[in-house]
Image (cartoon, rainbow, N blue to C red):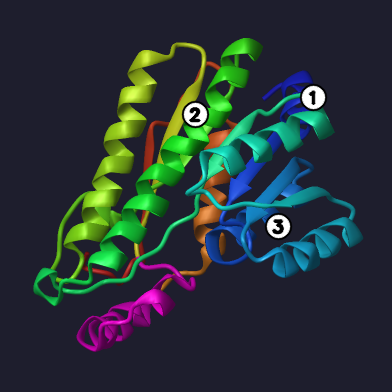
Amino acid sequence: MTTHENDAHKQKVVLITGASSGIGEATARLLAGKGLQVVLGARRTDRLETLVSEIRAEGGSAEYRALDVTSLEDMQAFVGFAKEKFDRIDVMVNNAGVMPLSKLDALKIDEWNRMIDVNIRGVLHGIAAGLPLMQQQGSGHFINISSIGGHTVSPTAAVYCATKFAVGAISEGLRQEVSDIRVTVISPGVTVSELADSISDSEARFVMQDFRKVAIPADAIARAIAFAIEQPNDVDVSEIIVRPTASPY
């Protein structure tokens, strides 16, 4: 990367959804530490306020806004907030997700709908809010967080996996349709996060506790996101799978 390209990279404006914990928080810290300007969105604004304060104390550039990704209007306002602050957006990291696992015969329909709303509609809303501005700019980068569950299905995870398969399909469709915007799918294996906290089904929670014993830190996924962003503009890293070395899945 040339000096000019490196300077342009450091000036990039990166929007991150689900930024109050886990992969979103780790990504915000890493990218801000590399000199990028991060705009953080989540429902838990108390955590965002603390995170932004810590990033700024370390010399980074960070802003935040309350965000519910299930609301298109909220997502549009989030993008508008970033544009007002920085006059552009360069990267949208659609990271917000939920994972309340259970077998289908448990009929936890409210939880199915929540996964559809956050994991699928949240990504679509990010695209709908960010794409017009990126097309107007003639450049941009969507990084959509899927999962190893977007590549294989396991018991208790049918609906969750379906939402993550959808993230992959949507991302690939977008990549094929736009020639001046980069699209990357990051598929984490088991990673330290609060995702498992949303599991209300006791059987699924027990299975996940054992599965998560080899979890890798969220920073491992943040580094993959940074790698995709740091490539020259004519290079699109379409997909990265990051999983624990010890994991068979």
Q: Position of residue 39 (x, y in %)?
A: 72, 45
Depth check, front residue: 131 or 188: 131
Q: Position of residue 48 (x, y in %)?
A: 72, 62
SS class, disc 1: loop
Depth check, front residue: 34 or 28: 28
Residue at image mark 3: 29
Is 205 drawn above or below residue 107 in the view shown? below
Q: Residue furthest left?
A: 105
Q: Amino acid at mark 3?
A: Arg
For residue 128, the mark is: 2
SS class, disc 2: helix
At a point 50% along the width and 50% down the height, the residue shown is 95
The region drawn magenta spans: 190-214
Please rate how many residues cluster around mark 2, counting C-alpha atoms within 10 Å: few if below 14, some from 14 to 19, many from 20. some
Label 2 close to label 1 by CB (< 8 Å) = no
Q: Quadrant of the N terminus?
A: top right
Label 1 close to label 3 by CB (< 8 Å) = no
Of marks 2 and 1, which one's residue comes earlier in the chain?
Answer: 1
Q: Principal SS element in the magenta part?
A: helix
Label 3 close to label 2 by CB (< 8 Å) = no
Q: Amino acid at mark 2?
A: Ala
SS class, disc 3: helix
Residue at image mark 1: 87
Residue 241 seen by the camera: no
Please rate how many residues cluster around mark 3, counting C-alpha atoms within 10 Å: few if below 14, some from 14 to 19, many from 20. many
Q: Amino acid at mark 1?
A: Asp
Please rate how many residues cluster around mark 1, counting C-alpha atoms within 10 Å: few if below 14, some from 14 to 19, many from 20. few
Q: Quadrant of the C terminus?
A: bottom left
Of marks 1 and 3, which one's residue comes earlier in the chain?
Answer: 3
